[in-house]
Amino acid sequence: MNMIAIMGVMLAGSLAWTIWFLKKPLADNGVDLRQSNIDIAKQRKLELQRDLDQDLIDQEQFELALDEITTTLAVELEQQSVKTSNSENNTLSMLAIVVLLPIFSIGIYQSLSTYAPTSIITPVVDSKPLTLEQSVEKLKQHISDEPNDSEAWTMLGLSYFELDKVKESLEAYEKAYQLTPNNSKLLVEYASTLISVNDNQFSDRPVALIKQALEIDANAPDALYLAGMFAISMQDFTLAKGLWNKALSVLPEGGDDHQALLGLLDELRRAESGQVSNTVTVNVLLSDQILANRSAEEYLMIYVKAAKGRPMPIAIQKLKLRDFNGQIVLSDMNSVMPTKLLSEHDKVLVVARLSRTGGAMKQADDIQITSSVVNVSDNPNITLELQ
Amino acid sequence: MLIELGHFALVLALVFAFLQVALPTVGLLRGSFSLAQLSRPMLWAQFFWVLVAFVILTNAFIGDDFSVKYVANNSNTELPAIFKMSAVWGAHEGSLLLWALILSGWSVAVSVFSKRLPNEVLNHILIILGLISIGFLLFLLLTSNPFERLDIIPVQGRELNPLLQDFGLIIHPPMLYMGYVGLAVPFAFVLSSLIRGQLDSTWLRWSRPWTLIAWAFLTFGITLGSWWAYYELGWGGWWFWDPVENASFMPWLVATALVHSLSVSEKRGAFKHWTVLLAIAGFSLSLLGTFLVRSGILTSVHSFAADPERGLFILVFLVIVIGGSLALYAWRASLMRSSNSFSWLSKESGLLINNILLVAAMLSVFLGTMYPLLLDSLSLGKISVGAPYFDAVFVPIMIPAVIAMVIAPFLRWKKDTLSRVGALLKNVWLGVVVLFAISFYIVDNQFVLFAVFLFIWIVSHSLWLLVNRMRQKSRPNLAFIGMLFAHIGIAVFLLGATVTTQLGIEKDIKMEVGQSMTIKGYKFVFKGVDNFSHQNYQGHKGKVEIYYEGDLIAKLNPEKRQYVTGMPMTEAAIDPSLYRDLYVALGESLEGNAWSLRIYYKPLIRWIWLGGLFISFGALLAAFDRRYRLISKRSES
């Protein structure tokens, strides 16, 4: 049974229920308001008598309270109940319900459902999670129907990026940009992707996009964050601080972004005050076998993790094998969490991993080597050999 | 497809809530019996569709349907099945759905078990409850749709907050919501009476058991929350005067006053103004609590400003509910005139003092909770109002209330004399003085001594009341026994809270494997740490052995967990008993084989929650008193 049919059944059941009780109303329970108040007054008098018997009140108080109960009842009995009649013709009411219930139900659903109206016709039958590839296919189908849907192009760009299809990702973002050049959120996302694919380097295009995003919305926190990163790359710490402080003022306190920015500002302060962070210098030797059998497009991930405690990286650098020159230096600037800097750790392990996918989790054909425990405070220089 | 059907079921629930209001209203105005009688069937249909929506959302969690944004944000495939179910109310949208379900559930209970209420009165009450349901269902559908789909479906969902992956959190929110939402029932009784212009004995009589049940759930919910915070947050505290806690405590204080005020109104027809205003205030504070917790204003007033949709909706709803109710109250105030007079020394005056003190206490909590938010939102600076403020303001207000609490039941209605009360209670007071004098030589902490005095004071008066009742050869009814339980519950709570706060010992120490520390004769020996992994987390499990007078009495395994999403969690290990808890939490790994540990000795801490249970149980007993039997039965005339 498809969704429309089930919704039809739900509506029909609802209508039948309503009309049934309109035609055959629930019987009156026979409790009259006047009688109810009289019953309660009688019970109160009984309770009062019990209080007198138990010496909880004296005779004078008993008489007074009895008077009050009688007076209260007299006032209550003056009040009139609403009179209803059951000899009535409800054809009009029934007609109104039959017409209005489905109209309201479907109307409200259509106006609220993000899947309406097409989703009702072609519902999502299988609600298992889609893979990224499936999502891309669905988006492409949607775009072929609605080629001017900028949001769909943006999502396609993001999906391609996740699939590591850089060229297609940038083309999709460019298309979205052509359709809605004044969408500051899109501009930031596009700029961010351009920076990512360019090994975190700020070229002219992303800088122009960030500038454009800030012209549209001077308080866009993402744009302010990226502008701050650009300022750092230009060694303009004062500008970066100003931009990030502005972003802080608009971000919700306590949120992840707010915390991350606070960490970055803290790091910036340390850098300005001349506090040099500790570093771990890692030399990685690649065996001839690896050089012969593995692609230069594979990823080399070098990271530091705590010798005891959380297995998550503290600081990491990830680069393609072709870009690796034999040595990298990990510092606070490579810390994963701005609030957990490399310098704050003591005993750590250094890991070098060669991976086809570059994913966070170790895969079956990844090659990995882990160092013995080193002290960060010693600014160690170690060598690892991948075989 | 199911998800869309869940969404549609919610829409149908809204339509039925609307019909629950519209059709009986038209029926009552036009005098049409069949339309007026539709309030119950429309309510039942509303409940059914909310239940369908709830079951579908639960199914989405169990089936890991990450195409649903709410599921993807709060569950993942690694989450144990039981927490997948409780994750349904682990965040905003699901909480609201649970709220709507409980509200319609309460309404159904009222419709089914109020067979002694005249149809006309019941229809009015269900119309008001329907209006509240409309507000919450609109809130759900317009701002907090739990069935929103994701355009790109993640392969894996996020983690349910590890703090919420706990048995306490499975039952704490539903119980608390039962209390919050339950206060909608006395509110609806009051409003329907104001609308009908009939503030008579019937609504007073039949709203009392519902108020007692709501109060019992609210007490139980708050008690569970306190117990959960104690063992789950890893700091050994049981109450933090946190705004979220205060948000539930304020309606509790007002509901406590309402329960007492209703008893005077019901038995003597007095305090109707108080009863009406307390019923309005109780539900309004429940809504305020929802606003505080759900608008994001507590995280930051700026987060409310940044995403005002939800907060604004509740704020508008709050203004309509409070404004509308108070307008109705003002319109009908003349109906509440009472000629019932009472002297300064009477049961009525005792209960009036109780009302005034409880409301004053609520206002002190309200000020401490709202004032910092107000200052911050007006950019007048940030201030922190914490335990010192509440200890200095709240506690002194409550002390006279606690002292007077056990005297009032001995007072006569209308008028009493000091000489009669003195003669009746002189033996009790003598006993209190003797016991207090003995305590004076045993206890050397002045705060604990005062708590012991209050404990003796409450328990001795309560027992004396029971003895007196037995002497009169009248069988105590459930309402009377319930009252005794609730009052003794306060005594148990007070003693537990004071003793654990004053005499508790807390040590944050570094321990090497094999090292030991002795607290109050208990020797804690650190035996090391093991690594372990579980379905959705891994971590370290500490091994601590506790010896008393040379005997091994407990082996504790505090845990430090690392959830798959990277969120760390401390899981304390506790050796509980009625006299004391021994509490160990594992801290950080230090150099060598040393670890930091938090070791707490908590005397009488269980009494805090035992007191809460006593109060809840007492309220439930009172609700099922013979006079309030809710089964259908013509009252014997």
Image: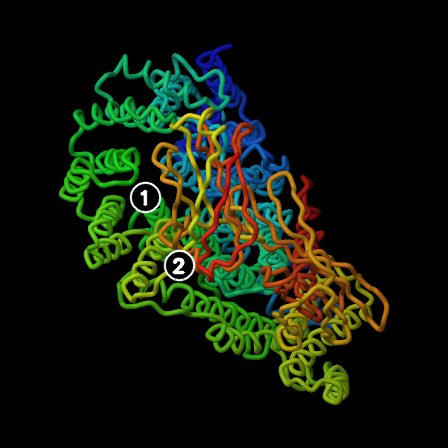
Q: Quadrant of residue A275?
A: bottom left
Q: Is residue A49 visible?
A: no
Whether labels 2 and 1 share one chain: yes
Q: Position of residue B437 (x, y in %)?
A: 74, 89
Q: Position of residue B160 (x, y in %)?
A: 53, 42
Q: Which mark is residue B333?
A: 2
Q: Nearer the viewer, residue A52 or A92?
A: A92
SS at mark 1 in the image? helix
Q: Amino acid at mark 1?
A: Glu
Q: Disc 1: which chain?
A: B
A298 is higher (above) or lower (below) than B281: above
Q: Position of residue B69 (x, y in %)?
A: 44, 32
- Name the residue at 53% across, 65% down: B240
A44 is higher (above) or lower (below) than B503: above
For label 1, count other residues whose C-alpha is less than 10 Å away and answer few (under 14), some (14-19) or many (20+).
some
- Name the residue at 45% across, 27% down: B67
Badge 2 vs badge 1, beta-carbon distance below 8 Å:
no
Q: Which residue is mark 1?
A: B309
Measured in 3D between alpha carbons, the distance from the residue under mark 2 to the one under mark 1, in whole angstroms, is 35 Å
Q: Is residue A30 visible?
A: yes
SS at mark 2 in the image? helix
B601 is higher (above) or lower (below) than B615: below
B535 is higher (above) or lower (below) than A350: above
- Name the residue at 69% across, 75% down: B455
Q: Nearer the viewer, residue B101 or B146?
A: B146
Identity of the residue furthest to the front in this view: A288
Q: Quadrant of residue A48?
A: bottom right
> Nearer the viewer's eye, disc 2 or disc 1?
1
Q: Disc 2: which chain?
A: B
Left or right: where B198 falls relative to B320: right
